[in-house]
Image: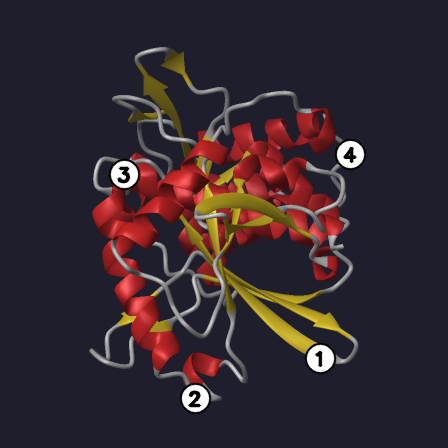
Amino acid sequence: MVEDSEIKTKVSPFAMREREIKVFDGKDGYVSMNQIIQKINLGHLTEIHFKILELINKFEFLTSRQLFQLLQIEKADIPSQDKLNNKLEQLIKCKILTRYYFLAQEGSGIYRVYCMEKMGKYLLNSREIECKWQPTDNAKPVEMIKKKLSGNQIVIAYLRKSKSVSSYILKPVITDKVTGKTFKPMANVKFEIGGKYVDFVYEIIRRNENWKQELADRMRQWKDFYDNFAPGDSGYGSIPQLIFVCEDDIHMAEVFKELVINQLSINKIRFYFTTDLEQNKDKLDKSLYEFVEEEGKYKKKNIEAKILG
């Protein structure tokens, strides 16, 4: 597998492209549960297949590269990306998993996205593993899937490269204390340093058609949460740090501009930014940025975050 630092692209694979659509790339037709059970009994579907299922159930959408990295983290018995791809193909043919790719004016995307199918849910339930998947999950639009892939890559990068990661939660539930409504950032990563814990929460922003309005609406919820924060709110003992994950450097500046124009600053925290491709660095301690005012102009400044090292 090509290492992250060897990837030379300047455009995130999880960035939005013009007129992009999602294309089904799974298997049509019918496969019975009896056929699947027979494959299990014959040893054609083994524990590594179930491990793949558990990870996709947990992360919802994954590329094969992301899945291979997660299996490496868990020290699963899978020697190569090619071996994993063969096992994914078996799961697709049995309709235990399905997959999609993205198509835009400039052509097809370079990767496939894997997600759950109903047979996969039945198999996990048979092992008393909770699976909340429902068919409508696979109907999510391109921008929601790409946000999830970007958020998953953040978590995977930290698990692989940061020694301070204590735990993580995907889509943690946050309560807007003014309206009482809940919302879910893409991920929460808890770091431990010097016996103390720090939480980072991640808002993934894509350039979909309504991103500016969506950002403004979400920031009002965050503002209500932060302005009225008390220890214990939404399970946090202290105020979590909010990180905006953008498509690229220009997008970071665009997001910051929207926050300033719409007066969406939050007094209790500083806004930190990163991009998808920053996670490809060998070390992540310089993967965060902020915008500071100098001589009447805002400038991007790199932050040294030793906690990410």
Crowd rating for badge 4 (residues with CA inside 10 Å; few <14, some 14–19, many 20+): few
Q: Is any atom of residue 135 visible in this view?
A: yes
Q: Nearer the viewer, residue 287 or 303?
A: 303
Amino acid found under the numbered disc labelled 4: Pro
Q: Which residue is mark 2?
A: 230
- Mark 3 lies on a secondary structure that is loop
Q: Amino acid at mark 2?
A: Ala
Residue plotted at (42% across, 40% down): 253
Circle nearer the N terminus (2, 4): 4
Residue at image mark 3: 141
- For badge 3, the amino acid type reads Pro
Task: Please tell me whether mark 4 or mark 1 is closer to you in this view.
Answer: 1
Q: Residue at x 24, y 51 (%)?
A: 214
Count neighbours of disc 3 (C-alpha within 10 A) and say few if under 14, some if 14 to 19, many if 20 or more.
few
Residue 117 in sight in this render: no
Q: Is residue 111 left or right of residue 81?
A: left
- Mark 2 or mark 4: which is in front? 2
The outermost residue toward the front is: 295
Q: Which is more N-terminal, label 1 or label 4?
A: 4
